[in-house]
Image: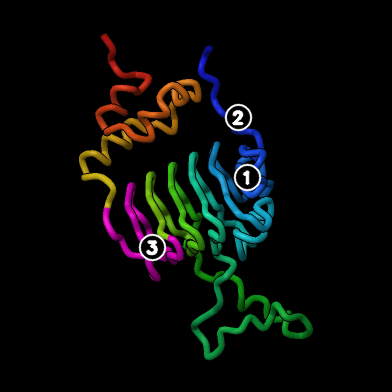
Amino acid sequence: MPAVPADPTVLHPMPEQPRVVLLKPLVTSPLIEVGEFSYYDDPDDATAFETRNVLYHYGPERLLIGKFCALGTGVRFLMNGANHRMDGPSTFPFPTMGGSWSEHFDLLTGLPGRGDTVVGNDVWFGHGATVMPGVRIGHGAIIGAGSVVTGDVPDYGVVGGNPARLIRTRYEPDDVARLLAVAWWDWPAEHITEHVRTIMSGGVADLEAAAPDAAHE
C-alpha cells in the first residue's frame, strides 16, 4: 500500500489525546502564522493557545512559527504590548486605567518594539519556556524547560536557563549548513512520509541522500 501522510488540517492529531492540538488549524489571529504540524500539548485547554499562551499581543508585531515545532505545556510568547515606559520615575501605565488619565495616552505611544517574534522549523520547546518579544529562534533548536529566551537562538542551538544561554549546538557548523540546505521540512508530504526513519534517526549524509533532488543512480 502507498504511504499516506498525516493530515495537517486535523485539530486533534491524536484523537485519544485531546490535550494535543495542531496550531495551524487552530489559530485565527492574522498576527499569528504557524506552519503545518506544529503542535501544542496542554492537559488543561490546549485550544486556548491564542489567549493563554500568546500574551500582550496588541499588535502590529507578528508571531511566526515554522513547521514541525513541538510546544510543551505552558510555553508562552510575550509580545511587544507588554512594554512599559522606563524613562521616567514611574513605569505604571496610568492612561490605560481610564478617567482623566486617559487624556495622556500619548505617553504610551511610540514605545520601543523589537519587531516580529520568529520561530524556525523543527524547534522543540520544553515545558514552561517563555519567549520574550522580538526573539528569533533558528531551525532545529531546542529550548529547555523553564527557559526565558531573551535573545536570538542559532540554528540547531540548545539553550536553557533564565536568561537562556547557549548550552551547545546539536551539530558542527558545516553539518548545520548541510542540514539547512536539505531543509527536510519543505519536502513534499509524501516524500517526508517515505523517509520518516531517516529524518528521525539518520545522519546528515543519510538525509542528503534521501532528499527529493538527490542524484540517484
**Picture residue at 49% right of the left edge, 83% below the top:** 87
Q: Is residue 151 left or right of residue 168?
A: right
Q: Nearer the viewer, mark 1 or mark 3?
A: 1
Q: Residue 105 at x, y = what percent?
A: 67, 76
Q: Secondary structure at mark 3?
A: loop
Q: Is residue 179 left or right of residue 119?
A: left
Amino acid bearing label 1 = Val
Q: Which mark is residue 21?
A: 1
Residue 174 sits in quarter: top left
CB atoms at circles 2 and 1 under 8 Å apart? no
Q: Is residue 92 left or right of residue 120?
A: right
Q: Residue 128 at x, y = what percent?
A: 51, 63
Q: Residue 83 at x, y = what percent?
A: 55, 72
Which span of residues is magenta-colored?
145-168
| Label 3 Cα neighbours within 10 Å, binned few <14 / some 14-19 / many ≥20 | some
Q: Is residue 188 above or below residue 162?
A: above
Q: Is residue 168 above or below residue 189?
A: below
Q: Residue 63 at x, y = what percent?
A: 55, 52
Disc with the residue nearer the chain's start (1 vs 3):
1
**Picture residue at 50% right of the left edge, 47% below the top:** 70
Q: Can residue 165 be found in the magenta stretch?
A: yes
Amino acid bearing label 3 = Gly
| Mark pair 3, 2: CA separation | 34 Å
Residue labelled with disc 2: 7
Q: Which mark is residue 151?
A: 3
Disc with the residue nearer the chain's start (3 vs 2):
2
Q: Secondary structure at mark 1?
A: strand
